Image: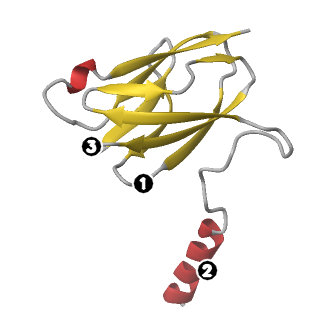
Amino acid sequence: ILIVFMLAVTIYTLRELPYNQPVYSAGAEPTVVDVEAMQFGWELSQTQFKAGEPVEFKVKSNDVNHGFGIYDEDMNILTQTQAMPAYTNEVYITFDEPGTYEVLCMEYCGLAHHAMTAEITVTE
């Protein structure tokens, strides 16, 4: 009985996968941003957005694993994913508030890891 119960709970909770679904309504086209991580910096194809604009980040690395994390002005993490060589991860976000957001590396990647930052600006 316990095995059947656990199987039912597992199936019920996994039916919502994948969790990383777009956060914009059907029919809305997101702004697609290519992100490339490298020791020790970020290259973003776009860094300025409007509040309420859906954004899809396509994140990859050209050397080692990096963690792509977006933080608000109070250093609260808003979203994150891994930047990995030979693989592209997607992360979706809609910035609700104008301001300056910071991209930080969340995976130790070498001696200058602490300097691996980028800035995103969101206007009204």
Which amino acid type is marked by label 2?
Ala
The amino acid type, in three-letter code, at marker 3 is Asp
Q: Check disc 1 and report the residue beneath it.
A: 87
Residue at position x 78%, y 38% in the image: 29
Q: How many marks?
A: 3
Residue 31 vertical position relative to residue 97 in the rendered view, above or below: below
Q: Quadrant of the C terminus?
A: top right
CA neighbours of label 2 inside 10 A, class few (<14), some (14 to 19), many (20+): few
Q: Quadrant of residue 111?
A: top left
Figure quadrant of the N terminus:
bottom right
Q: On the image, numbered disc 3 is attached to which residue? A: 63
Q: Residues within 10 Å of mark 3 (few under 14, many from 20)?
A: some
- Gap between marks 1 and 2 measured at Cα: 33 Å
Q: Label 1 sits on what residue type?
A: Tyr
**Which residue appears farthest toward the left when viewing the image?**
111
Q: Which residue is mark 2?
A: 8
Which is more N-terminal, label 2 or label 1? 2
Residue occupying the point 36% across, 35% down? 37
Residue 73 sits above or below residue 38 on the image: above
